[in-house]
Amino acid sequence: MSPVLATAASASLIRKEVAGLPSYDPGADPAEVAVLSGSDRVIKLSNNESPFGASPVVAEAVRKALADGVSRYPDPTGRRLAEAIGRSLDVPAERVVLGNGSENILELLCRAVLDPGDLVVTQAPGFSLHETFPRVMGARVQKVPVTAEFGFDVAAWREALAAGPKLVFLANPCNPTGAMLNAGQLECVVADIPDSALLVLDEAYGEFARPDPEYPDGLEALRALDRPWIVLRTFSKAYGLAGVRVGYGIASDSALIRALDRVRTPYNVNHPAQETAIAALGDHAHLADTVRRTALEIARVTERLRDAGLGVVPSWTNFLFIDTGRRSDEVAHELQRVGIIVKAWREPGYETYIRASLSTPGDNDVFVRALTEICVKEKP
């Protein structure tokens, strides 16, 4: 069979739900940007990684995990890590699920819960996989937009929840805006969710917001509720472990965890990842220092960009959502030409926005200067 005929035959096998999905955009390849810019210094601000790295104790955990041998499968239950998370959060290990990043758990939830035609409610603008994974299962997705000031629209959420969703994805703080819901807003959502729906509270960036007294700890807010819920967190962001991929969920009951175990691959979190997560979880000082330094840079860079005339959404994360006033893909390409990678946002209604995770102060200064030169016209 010729390649052309083989391609056509393969295409005919693909489910219609899958064929219509967009590809995930991880941002530009640093090696390609280095060639384009002609510079050895590439500043990567597209993936919300921590510039401050992992805890120093992680290196020893990796060394020991590798010394233990990589020829054997990891613990499929991740028991030691689940118990460590359980102790730190005062929940039974049986209510903890591990994932290859928290997005792995998003996928598992959709596989375990959704039937074709089910309704999922989430945010707009929002994390693309909150929409993609439900659509893979043939579910319908309704996205609730923010207000003009990027605030939480209580009335719009009430209307969407009244339609009877089976799954509700709520990110706090939100990706890509960096905005957060306060305790009263979270309470409004919870009160209006049908009893038959599962609330998925995605707190991937929660560590950055937690020092703010207005930020509601989702686990504490939901702990006493007599309804199904799950809170998702990750070691990829504030803990600086993006490369080893460890996320986790804390569920309302162990029955939900058992359902997720049935649809996940048995070895979805490798042994070095489990061991490094345990080590990172115990280094409270490094986490606090990362959060503190990140908050300082968020405030400093936000002020500089606003002083330059750019719109910046207030952020409780390690990234900024910036209105460039121009097509975001054009701005992103011009930044690549000077060795800077950001995420161009293409969601309808936000095509002039870029998302930029912050780096070290020196890198951030380079980014601010470059973005200002590209987007802000000289005043006469």
Image: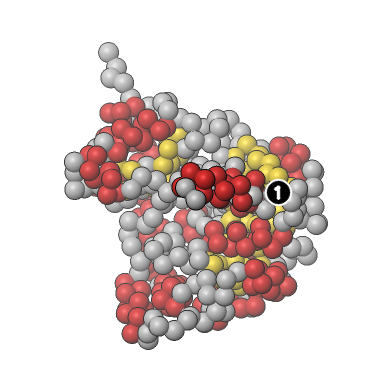
Taking the view exactly as shown, the residue that stands out farthest to the bottom is 68
User: Compared with residue 8, is residue 225 higher up or lower down, i.e. above or below?
Assistant: below
Amino acid residing under circle 1: Ala
Nearer to me, 182 or 31: 31
Residue 68, visible in the rendered structure = yes
User: Compared with residue 272, is residue 225 higher up or lower down, i.e. above or below?
Assistant: above
Circle 1 sits in a helix, a strand or a loop, which is it? loop
On the image, the x and y values in percent for residue 16 come to: 65, 45
Quarter of the picture holding the C terminus: top left
* x 54%, y 67%: residue: 99
Residue position for label 1: 139
On the image, the x and y values in percent for residue 262 come to: 66, 72
Q: In which quarter of the image is residue 308?
A: top left
* x 46%, y 47%: residue: 3
On the image, the x and y values in percent for residue 166 come to: 75, 53
User: Compared with residue 57, is residue 244 higher up or lower down, i.e. above or below?
Assistant: above
Is residue 372 toward the left or the right of residue 169 in the image?
A: left
Is residue 359 toward the left or the right of residue 351 in the image?
A: left
Q: In which quarter of the image is residue 39?
A: top left
Q: How many badges with numbers are in the image? A: 1
Q: How crowded is mark 1: few (under 14 residues within 10 Å), some or many (20 or more)?
A: many
Nearer to me, 301 or 231: 231
* x 71%, y 53%: residue: 167
* x 36%, y 31%: residue: 331
User: Compared with residue 126, is residue 271 higher up or lower down, i.e. above or below?
Assistant: below
In this figure, which colouring scheme has been used for the structure?
Answer: secondary structure
Taking the view exactly as shown, the residue that stands out farthest to the top is 380
Nearer to me, 271 or 253: 271
Nearer to me, 125 or 179: 125
Residue 214, visible in the rendered structure = no
Is residue 330 toward the left or the right of residue 97 in the image?
A: left
On the image, the x and y values in percent for residue 318 come to: 42, 51
